[in-house]
Amino acid sequence: MHFMKKLALTAATALMVSGAAQAADKLRIGTEGAYPPFNTLTKDGTLVGFDIDIANALCAEMKVECEFVVQDWDGMIPALMANKFDAVIASMSITEERLKKIDFSEKYYNTPPALAVPKDSDMKDASAASLKGKLVGAQSSTTHSEYAEKKLEGIELKLYPTPDEFKLDIEAGRLDAVIEDVTVLGEWLKSDKGSCCKMLTLLTPDPVINGKGAGVAVRKGETELANKFSAAIKALRANGKYKEINNKYFDFDVYGGE
């Protein structure tokens, strides 16, 4: 009888913690694990990176436990909407298009897109003349792929599931250029694998496409949770924890101005 009561209690508890208001002491955080230096899965299955450290610091500030859920990028928003996790901390830009489906905290960083090319490239800049006929790689369903499609004139665009795939193709000479966040490209170019290539140019962000920076994504209408994340971001900026995490990865402030 006691065992049955325990089972019933467990089932009731499971129901209570499902949904947006999961247990008050735990939040499930969706992330990609394929976007260094922001979020990466190591060979032993550990999540590391700026997003991960920021997520843990935000949860600590909010006095909740973070439980990470790894999710492919293309399915990130559908998985959030389907309650697979409570929030997304995965370098997701706050854009008008995404705000139609989900809500966000304030930004926790904002860095511009850039183009990288092979070291022997004849490309001089991001002008139409320089780009004409060039094969450019980008990660699908990102602000960068949308930027390439709408702003880079005359290119042929090839889409990839993660940046790792387009890096392999440009390393092998199968692409003329790649578009990605400047910090992601910078990290890769400093590595042995990135020795094939160089930074061509920073691109001017488009406010409609690139949005207001990366924020914490939550389900539509979960304003209270979004506000809690925003308050925690401000607290990390004020108490020096943000700077400590920032300086572990970057030699400039990725927050992008107050």
Image (spheres, grey):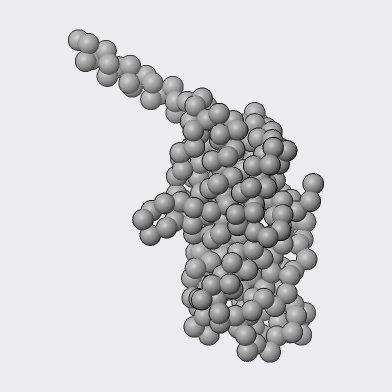
In the rendered image, is residue 13 in sight? yes
Residue 153 pos. (x, y %): 73, 76
Q: Nearer the viewer, residue 7 or 29?
A: 29
Q: Position of residue 136 (x, y in %)?
A: 61, 76
Q: Residue at x 60, y 57 (%)?
A: 249
Q: Does residue 234 sit above or below 181 in this rendering?
A: above
Q: Observer-nearest residue: 233 or 123? A: 233
Residue 97 at x, y = what percent?
Answer: 68, 50
Name which residue lies at 44% across and 56% down: 41
Vertical position of residue 163 compared to residue 100: above or below: below
Identify which residue is drawn at 36% across, 56% down: 44
Q: Residue at x 33, y 22 (%)?
A: 11
Q: Quadrant of residue 205?
A: bottom right
Please identify the quadrant where the N terminus is shown: top left
Say how many tags the image has: 0
Query: Relative to residue 80, is residue 177 depicted above or below?
Result: below
Give the vertical position of 240 relative to 97 (above or below): above
As rendered, which of 169 and 135 lies closer to the eye?
169
* Residue 98 in the figure: left or right of residue 65: right
Residue 156 visible in the current orientation: no
- Outermost residue on the top side: it is 1
